[in-house]
Image (tube, rainbow, N blue to C red):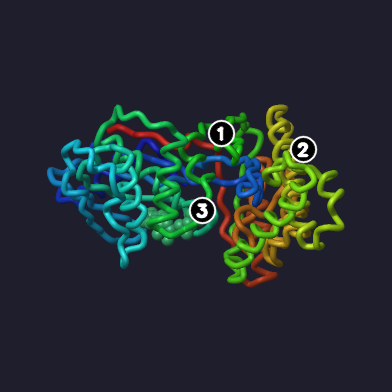
Amino acid sequence: MVDNRSSLPKKMSMNFGKIYAGQKPAFVSRASGRVELIGGHTDYNEGFVIAAAIDSSACVAAAKRNDNIICLYSEWARQKHEFELPAFAGTSLPLRKQGPAPEPSQDCQWANYGRGVAAYLCREGLDVKGANLYIASDVPVGAGLSSSAALEVSLAKAMIHLSKPDWQIQPKRLAQICQKAENVYAKSPCGILDQITAVTATKDHVILLDCRDVSVRLLPFDSNACSIMIFNSMVKHEIGGGEYGKRRRQCEEACAVIAEKYPQVRALRDADQAMLDSVKNQLDNVQFLRAGHVIGENARVLAAAEALKQNDIEKLGRLMNESHCSARDLYQISCEQTDFLAEQIWQSDGAYGARLCGGGFGGSVVALVQPDAAAKISKNVRKAYKDRFDLDCDVYLAKPWQGTEIIEPA
Ligand code: ADP
Ligand code: MG
């Protein structure tokens, strides 16, 4: 976690100079990782999710160049990578809107996030300028906290601020551009939750995202009363990939059957349990279970939003526990390790609730706990996990944070 934000530009400035021949960055842009508190697999059913931008972030220190090259350096990759902006960079020829240039790189996967963001910003009409960019991130990679979206959004903000600081773009549009960069250039078929969270979230709030129209509502979150913990099981089961596609199909099939009887149902988000029950004999058992999870989960997200408005953290915790059980029993995306972590947390003093987050088949469990209980819970759960699976589970403490910002030098 970045705990001393005020020293960050100074530290990055020093490192920047080492990579870029003594040059000083003009500013640092920052974008947060995110955690999904509740709303598992509701996104592609046009439902709701509650997520928080967290105080781990990807930072990009940026300085102008006099040519049309973007140079990236990543501390994580310990590597420099350059690419050229379209030859007409530096002018405002309309041609720039025509195609997503530069192309994806075949041999430098991490740089494709930067290439993609630059390409789609160009297509959006921004005259992206040549830049030296230095990336430092404390969002752990692959832990379910979306290091990729933090990187894209931070890069996009840096490119915009360097090229045309007063350029106007809607937050939703910016999130879509970053998502497209990830989908097309990094070949990762992610939804928009990660990017929209970084772009819209504010400190001490979580967001309620309506995945149908990508609208966002901010809900208060009292970090003094409650801490967010993330337990990375450190396992990722291979079966996950194909199973995700299967779940999507099963939801579509169940939805189609419900929609025959109730034409107002366009996605499972529009259905309720009574509708599902009324078509039970037209569905196979698996379709029935999958739809039951999505319908229940959507209702839980809306109940959780109400609980947050009432500052009822205990209720929110209970809803998270129910969410885990539904993911385990109806959606069948949990596994031994994530079930064990959730159960250990449920039994801990000072824990409000815990659930599997992200896609499933391994990955992370998110928990809400009393702040003064966090250290003990972390220690005990890590030990129990090690004893049971001989694996070290990484634990992160997170606070809802401002999703993105530009930090100017002091
Ligand atoms: P996550 O759940 O963390 O988003 P992804 O697989 O979606 O996992 O994204 C991880 C990828 O994002 C990395 O393999 C790398 O290509 C890119 N990435 C994340 N952080 C950095 C960084 N600091 N520097 C360079 N690339 C990064
Ligand atoms: Mg990602």
Give the percent coordinates (x, y) of residue 307. 73, 32
Mark 2 vs mark 1: give the one in front: 1
Q: Residues within 10 Å of mark 3 (few under 14, many from 20)?
A: few
Residue at 41% across / 38% down in the picture?
174
> Relative to 251, does residue 215 appear above or below in the rendering?
above
Which residue, as the protein is rendered here, is positioned at the far left? 66
Give the percent coordinates (x, y) of residue 305. 69, 34
Q: Which residue in the protein does label 1 denote?
A: 215
- Among numbered discs 1 and 3, the one appearing first in the sequence: 3
Going by the numbered disc 1, the residue's amino acid type is Ser
Under circle 3, the secondary element is loop
Give the percent coordinates (x, y) of residue 102. 27, 54
Is residue 300 among the parts visible in the rendering?
no
Going by the numbered disc 2, the residue's amino acid type is Lys
- Among numbered discs 2 and 3, the one appearing first in the sequence: 3
Q: CA distance from mark 2 to mark 3?
A: 30 Å
From the viewer's side, name the closer residue of 289 and 344. 289
Residue at 72% across / 31% down in the picture?
306
Q: Which residue in the protein does label 3 denote?
A: 190
Q: CA distance from mark 1 to mark 3?
A: 17 Å
Left or right: 69, with 337 as reference point: left
For residue 315, the mark is 2
Is residue 406 among the parts visible in the rendering?
yes
Left or right: 121, with 371 as reference point: left
